[in-house]
Image (cartoon, rainbow, N blue to C red):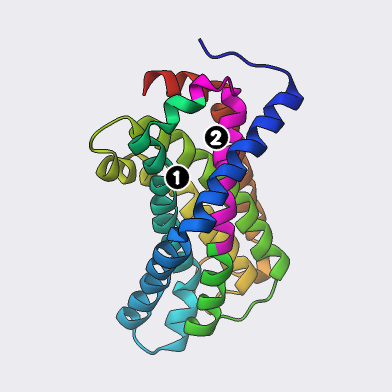
Amino acid sequence: MPTMTTEPSVWRDAWVVSAKDLRIEMRSRVVMNQVLPFGLLVLVLFALALGPGRQTLIGAAPGLFWVAVLFSSVLAVQRSFSLESSDGARDGLRLAGLDPAGVFLGKAGAVAAQLGALEVVLGAGVVVLYGADVRSLLGLVAACLVATVGLAAAGTIYGALAAGLRVRETLLPFLLLPVVAPVLLAGTRAWQAALGSPPGAAGGASTGGGDPWMGVLVVFALVYVSLGVLLYGYLEEAA
């Protein structure tokens, strides 16, 4: 039965797990060498498919950015759990006596850090490839921060569910992508408001239409962070 210890212990365990995952990534550079090029390739292929029309590219830029982020998040979460599944590290974490909530927060924090780095590069790619005009940098950053927390929390939960299965590589996208559809929708609308939609596009920036969608992102993040803190220990035992 998973137990909850004192709050300082939770944050200490979260720091230990997060530092461990980030050290592994810094040594292997899988996210930077494989996941990031994949995300950029998605942006390039969509740009080729949409053609050279500037207004078309600008109108599609917010949605394509978040599609690339969602696909990249699946790869990042798979990477986070594949190492522990292959060498028995998950059993080691259980035996180490770490607080399950701390393990969840640590793994989600490491995934969020990696996604944040990816989003910086992909956002620059949107500006360069699609010619998007940033009208509210604060709006872009706020949407990315909140959405990243939600994606990392949801990815960690469903990554733990799929990690113990032989078909985890193919099962995780089917579990995760439908769940994070609100992030795709709300993130796209929030970015449309921050970038400024071309005439006829949904969610024009002049109306301030991004604010309700930011609320959706906040609720999504709060729900999955809360679920992870409360249930991660049981998910680890069931996996």
Considering the whole magenta stretch, tell me its main secondary structure: helix
CA gap, disc 1 to disc 2?
A: 18 Å
Q: Give the vertical position of 78 relative to 48 (above or below).
A: above
Where residue 238 sits in the image (x, y, percent)? 38, 19
- Find disc 2 in the rendering and name its residue: 224
Q: Give the vertical position of 214 relative to 99 (above or below).
A: below
Q: Is residue 48 visible?
A: yes
In depth, the one of 213 and 81 nearer the eye is: 81
Q: Is residue 216 visible?
A: no
Within 10 Å of disc 2 (Cα), the crowding (few <14, some 14-19, many 20+) is many
In depth, the one of 166 and 45 nearer the eye is: 166
Tag 1 secondary structure: helix
Q: Amino acid at mark 2?
A: Tyr
Asked whether residue 147 is drawn in magenta, I would say no
Where residue 224 sits in the image (x, y, percent)? 55, 34
- Find disc 1 in the rendering and name its residue: 80
Within 10 Å of disc 1 (Cα), the crowding (few <14, some 14-19, many 20+) is many
> Which range is magenta?
94-117
User: Which residue is pictured at 57% across the width and 43% down the height?
Assistant: 20
